[in-house]
Image (cartoon, rainbow, N blue to C red):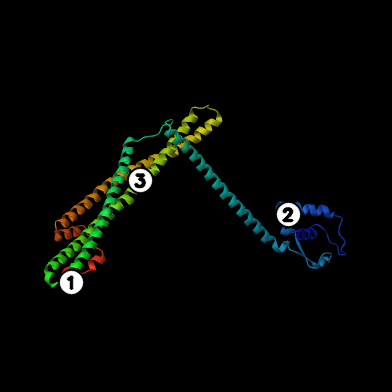
Amino acid sequence: MSEGIMSKAATMEIPISSNGVSGTLNEDESLEQDLQQVMVSGPNLNETSIVSGGYGGSTEGIIPTGSMKGSMSQQSSHASLTSEELSRGVAVEKFDLMKKWGINTYKCTKQLISERFGRGSRTVDLELETQIELLRDTKRKYEGVLLLARALTSHFYSLVQTQRALGDAFSDLSQKSPELQEEFGYNAETQKLLCKNGETLLGAINFFVSSINTLINKTMEDTLMTVKQYETARLEFDAYRADLEELSLGPRDAATLCRIEIAQQNFQIHRNKYEKLRGDVTIKLRFLQENKVKVMHKQLLLFHNAISSYFAGNQQQLEASLQQFNIKLSSAASDKPSWLEEQ
């Protein structure tokens, strides 16, 4: 770097005569000026020259580069300036976002602590709060039903597999025990028939479980996500409301009036957001209630008919229940031949 600077100083500041004698400019002062210029703004290509004959050569060996690289230097400088401005703009934008986030977090935390300790007031919509709490309680109870239905599916699947194995064992013994062939045959047919009906019932129960799971973890969860956004907006609204009330009780000098105006604008923004989300929650709760009644009416009817038909031994009614709700059994169960086809 020092050699480059010295070369730059030699070609830029020290005039070279035809006989190689330097001018009267002091070399120390020239070098100091060049160092200062490099530290501040860097080298300037418009002021450099390429010496072809070496240091002390004739003037005929000096090739000026200003005319050849002037436009390129200007474009590079403009691109560098644009890049710096863009980076500075991004940094300022991120800083403003962090600043706003920090202020908002501080206000909301302060409001939340005040509410927890009973020192701050909060906006309450009694009717909406009651509906939200009812939804959460309903979701917990439906989750209990879903857990029990899954347990029933697991246990009943094990029962069906046991019946299938028992039917195969009876069928094998029927062929190998001539003296008990008829008795083993009856039991083998009974177990295989129960197994077939059990697979049909499992199809109905699985459909019931799938529908309840969708209702809980998609439909209800989507509404509760909107509820969480509403509760956050309510907290922000109360935080900025409390901030505006606190400023309004203070002195009314010029600085305070400016802060009150800004606080009023922020309060109005969060008020609009709160009211919009409150309307969204009200609409979603109404639609959820209608959808829940429709889904559960269908699923409870299916569950009742399938269970009743299975334990009553009514195979035709059990299959009709699945056809009524357009339920198809899995390919593994439908592809397996029935016990009648095996005989």
Q: Are marks 2 and 3 in contact (CB under 8 Å)?
A: no
**Compared to 111, does 175 lie above or below?**
below
What residue sits right under mark 3 in the picture?
Answer: 224
Tell me residue 104's x, y (percent).
49, 40
Taking the image as shown, residue 7 lies to the left or right of residue 95, namely: right
Tell me residue 169's x, y (percent).
20, 67
Query: What's under tag 2, amino acid-wise?
Result: Val
Q: Are marks 1 and 2 in contact (CB under 8 Å)?
A: no
Q: What whole-number distance in Å separates the C-alpha atoms at marks 1 and 2?
A: 96 Å
Which of pointers 2 and 3 lies earlier in the amino acid sequence? Answer: 2
Q: What whole-number distance in Å separates the C-alpha atoms at marks 2 and 3?
A: 62 Å
| Residue occupying image coordinates x 76% and y 58% | 2
| Residue occupying image coordinates x 16% and y 56% | 311
Q: Can residue 321 be seen from the camera position used here? A: yes
Q: Is the C terminus in the top left, top right, bottom left or bottom right quadrant?
A: bottom left
Taking the image as shown, residue 201 lies to the left or right of residue 275, namely: left
Q: What whole-number distance in Å separates the C-alpha atoms at marks 3 and 1?
A: 53 Å
Q: Can residue 328 be seen from the camera position used here? A: no
Q: Is the N terminus in the top left, top right, bottom left or bottom right quadrant?
A: bottom right
**Compared to 21, does 268 lie above or below?**
above
Which of pointers 3 and 1 lies earlier in the amino acid sequence? Answer: 3
Which of pointers 1 and 2 lies earlier in the amino acid sequence? Answer: 2
What residue sits right under mark 1 in the picture?
Answer: 342
Label 3 sits on a secondary structure element that is helix
Front position in the image: 295 or 62 = 295
Callout 3 crowding tier (Cα within 10 Å): few <14, some 14–19, many ≥20: some
Label 2 sits on a secondary structure element that is helix
Query: What's under tag 3, amino acid-wise?
Result: Leu
Label 1 sits on a secondary structure element that is helix
What residue sits right under mark 2 in the picture?
Answer: 38
